[in-house]
Image: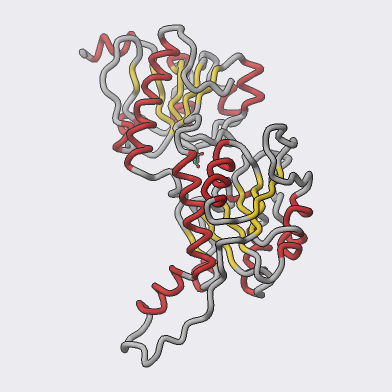
């Protein structure tokens, strides 16, 4: 498509890293044009250096780590649609979007199975010390004289507390039922169709379980929902797995509890200040770290690419969004 024609179409601004992630590479469309980010400054720079052109931005294709707070949204008067390639929407000020009538779509249920797989994998890895065992071999300069390795903790039959029994939480529960685990949960409200015991507080859930798996959204109510008191209630052998958002846990307290062995271990796919991960975690054998990669499968990337495209096409054709948030 010729550049002049593209410039007449509504512009979709990519709010993410300087290059499109390969899986989101856009192709030409009839009724909108996704601006190649490498041809533009970041959204912040664009707003500050092109105050008269901000009205060209009708829609934003956003990635999870790139915030769209009220200040940014207020400087985009013509913005009508945000599609985020994440399931989580905590980087977007949804109240401001509601107030302005900006529509928002996300990844919907696309990543739930992958994230649940990862939660279970992290749990097994921490409990059965798989990464620690791998490190045990790799750190040896000479082949070890004997395999003197600490005992792991049995996963089958464990009492598991799921925090956030939404789509991901239910997938986690389905998998761990087949391990003979006993499940209970905490969420904003008791789910009428779910028979697992419900605890209205995470502290109570931790008191009654061996493992906490965090699958809930991050918001003002859930920030630091796992604090020191909750960790101490989970107890010495307890394991925490976080596939939600880093700030669900008080990370400084978690680090202390891991160092002092107040809990047994943790499997973390997410961190409080991503992409920063406190270095003190690196030397601990009772924690397994993963770079927010629960959603990073080839299959889910192919899926999100299609879903982003379908939502943009729906929005610019005035059709209902495929995976609307608001
Ligand atoms: O964390 C990943 C997502 O929200 O999709």
User: In x, y percent, where is residue 235?
Assistant: 71, 67
Residue nearer the viewer, 154 or 297: 154
Q: How many marks?
A: 0
Q: Quadrant of residue 157?
A: bottom right
Q: Residue furthest bottom?
A: 145
Colour scheme used in the picture? secondary structure
Residue 204 visible to the viewer: yes
Q: Residue at x 43, y 49 (%)?
A: 293
Which percent across, then down, holds residue 135? 41, 74
Observer-nearest of 61 and 301: 301
Closest to the observer, 116 or 29: 116
Q: Is 235 left or right of 68, judged from the image as shown?
A: right
From the top left corner, tell me how far across and down residue 22 is, in percent.
Answer: 29, 37
Looking at the picture, does residue 76 appear above or below residue 154? above
Left or right placement of residue 202 versus residue 304 in this view: right
How far from the left and from the top, in percent, is residue 52? 47, 16
Quadrant housing the N terminus: top left
Establish if 55 lies above or below 170: above
Classify residue 23 by image quadrant. Answer: top left
Quarter of the image that includes the C terminus: top right
Q: Is any atom of residue 273 visible in this view?
A: no
Residue at left 35%, top 37%? 301
**What residue is rendered at 42% in x and 13% in y?**
314
């Amino acid at each position: 498509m010729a550049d002049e024609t593209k410039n007449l179409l509504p512009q979709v601004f990519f709010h993410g890293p300087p290059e499109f992630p390969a899986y989101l590479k856009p192709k030409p469309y009839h009724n909108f044009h996704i601006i190649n980010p490498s041809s533009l400054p970041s959204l912040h720079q664009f707003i500050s250096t092109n105050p008269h052109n901000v009205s060209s931005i009708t829609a934003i294709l956003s990635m999870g780590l790139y915030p769209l707070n009220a200040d940014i949204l207020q400087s985009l008067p013509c913005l009508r649609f945000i599609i985020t390639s994440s399931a989580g929407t905590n980087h977007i000020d949804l109240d401001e979007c509601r107030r302005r009538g900006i529509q928002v779509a996300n990844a919907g249920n696309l990543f739930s199975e992958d994230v649940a797989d990862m939660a279970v994998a992290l749990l097994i890895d921490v409990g059965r010390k798989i990464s620690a065992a791998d490190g045990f071999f790799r750190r040896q300069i000479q082949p070890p004289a004997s395999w003197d390795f600490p005992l792991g903790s049995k996963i089958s039959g464990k009492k598991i507390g799921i925090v956030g029994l939404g789509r991901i939480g239910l997938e986690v529960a389905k998998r761990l039922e087949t391990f003979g685990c006993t499940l209970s949960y905490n969420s904003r409200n008791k789910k009428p169709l779910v028979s697992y015991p419900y605890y209205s507080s995470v502290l109570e859930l931790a008191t009654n379980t061996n493992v906490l798996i965090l699958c809930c959204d991050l918001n003002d109510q859930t920030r630091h929902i796992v604090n020191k008191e909750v960790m101490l209630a989970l107890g010495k052998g307890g394991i925490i797995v976080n596939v939600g958002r880093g700030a669900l846990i008080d990370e400084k307290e978690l680090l202390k509890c891991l160092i002092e062995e107040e809990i047994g271990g943790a499997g973390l796919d997410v961190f409080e200040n991503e992409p920063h991960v406190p270095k003190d975690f690196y030397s601990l054998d009772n924690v397994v770290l993963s770079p927010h990669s629960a959603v990073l499968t080839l299959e889910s990337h192919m899926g999100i690419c299609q879903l982003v495209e379908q939502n943009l096409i729906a929005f610019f054709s005035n059709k209902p969004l495929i995976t609307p948030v608001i």
